[in-house]
Image: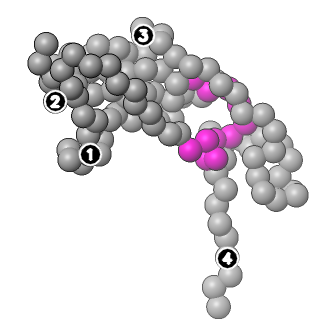
Amino acid sequence: VKPDNRFNIGYLLKNEFGDDLIISFSTDQPENVWLSQKQSSISTIRTFIDTSVLNEGKYSVYLLASIHCEKMIYTEEDNIRLDFEIIGNRGKSPYWFNKRKSVLAPFIKWENIY
């Protein structure tokens, strides 16, 4: 089987309420840094999700894969997923004790401008 450069893998991050938070594919970046594909080989890939922007709660990461603009190989409906939970104070402030009433809860820098 010849490698197909249109193949891409990705993920969908959802919160516990079913809201789509992030959809990312390996082909979202410039073509010169796409994942390399070798014929008849198995490779390990990884990606990172910056969980510092997430609020307390439960999350699911669903595997996505497709041949670009031709067919989906794995979708959310295939239910290949990893579940995780964020517990505890997410802020850096002594005043931030509870879960925020928002989907995201990033640490945002504030500063005086004089």
In the rendered structure, which segment of residues is drawn in magenta? Answer: 50-60
User: Which picture quadrant has residue 7?
Assistant: top left
Question: In the rendered structure, are the residues bearing label 1 and label 4 in contact, judged by CB atoms less than 8 Å apart?
Answer: no
Q: Residue at x 56, y 44 (%)?
A: 50
Residue tagged by mark 2? 5
Question: Distance of mark 2 from mark 1, alpha carbons?
Answer: 12 Å
Question: Distance of mark 3 from mark 2, alpha carbons?
Answer: 24 Å
Q: Residue at x 61, y 41 (%)?
A: 51
Q: The disc labelled 2 sits on which kind of residue?
A: Asn
Question: Distance of mark 3 from mark 1, alpha carbons?
Answer: 29 Å
Question: Which label lies toward us, 1 or 4?
Answer: 1
Residue 52 in picture, x, y percent from top left: 64, 47
Residue 13 in picture, x, y percent from top left: 51, 29
Residue tagged by mark 1? 33
Q: Earlier in the sequence, mark 3 or mark 2?
A: 2
Q: Earlier in the sequence, mark 2 or mark 4?
A: 2
